[in-house]
Amino acid sequence: MTYKTIITENIGQDAGLDVGLDVGLITFNRPQVLNALSNQLRTELAQALSDFENNHALGAIVITGNEKAFAAGADIMEMKDQSYIDAYQGDAAGNLEQAINQCRKPVIAAVSGYAFGGGCELAMMCDFIIASETAKFGQPEINLGVLPGWGGTQRLTRLVGKSKAMDMCLTGRMMDAVEAERCGLVSRVLEQDKFIDQVLSIAKLVASKSLPALMMNKECINQAMETSLHSGLLFERRQFQAAFASADQKEGMAAFVEKRKPHWQHK
């Protein structure tokens, strides 16, 4: 379908990874307002994620903005006059969060420039964040007389710890890419030059793996965020055992023994 606030692309595999699936790329396209997350953008993003999830040619999804901003937050012009009942019934991030949570394929946030407020929270909804050296993260809602409402007090605390989350949410200060990597908010920091090409190379590597194995790994890691160690270990063990029912387990182990590349069937 045609979108007005985002651009979607299917990125094919490189020659050396021709056994893998493609990558779905979603780029925010509201540069005039630093990709502020308007109602329309959130709706279109949720639809694009659903379409990519149901596209059997894709093995991973990348969400990004532009060099200046991933997303500078929610669209304050849309929110400033809302009442409690407007905010409650609108449930601004609910549909988007549900769309990301329903993605069983890996979802990668590629962050360059500003990721503030809802932009930071959206990045944290993804499976992992790759930052450019220009990336800046923040939860500045305190400066607007409110608080983070799309996961900023919850995911941020789980990712970076109570002290740093308190610091960011109570002062509204920015965190640069180096600090974000040091405290575990992002997985790695890349040079700005050819940033998105580098991220897509990582996403293509992910998408070159067995899709069922990717999904099972993702499910287990997400379970670790929600449960006790004992329950998580049991969940992981059962998923590991279940993997032996897949055709890709047979192919992967046979390829290892035969010293060749596996040819995944993705089942």
Image (cartoon, helix red, strand yellow):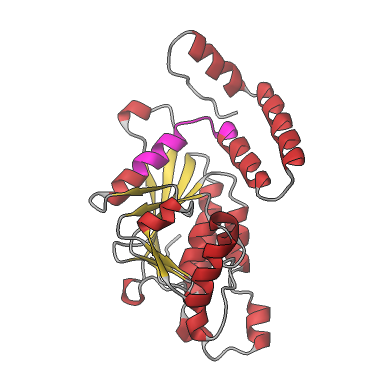
Q: Is residue 235 left or right of residue 109?
A: right
Q: Nearer the viewer, residue 181 or 204?
A: 181
Give the percent coordinates (x, y) of residue 217. 60, 36
Q: Residue at x 55, y 61 (%)?
A: 156
Which residue range is magenta in the image?
200-213
Q: Is residue 122 left or right of residue 134?
A: right
Q: Is residue 224 left or right of residue 188?
A: right
Give the percent coordinates (x, y) of residue 25. 40, 51
Is 207 a magenta residue?
yes
Q: Is residue 4 visible?
A: no
Q: Residue at x 26, y 53 (%)?
A: 192
Give the percent coordinates (x, y) of residue 15. 31, 29
User: Farthest residue toward the front?
Assistant: 163
Position above or below: 89 against 27 = below
User: Farthest residue toward the top?
Assistant: 258
Position above or below: 215 against 126 = above
Q: Residue at x 29, y 62 (%)?
A: 67
The C terminus lies in quadrant: top right
- Secondary structure that dominates the magenta span: helix
Is 224 a magenta residue?
no
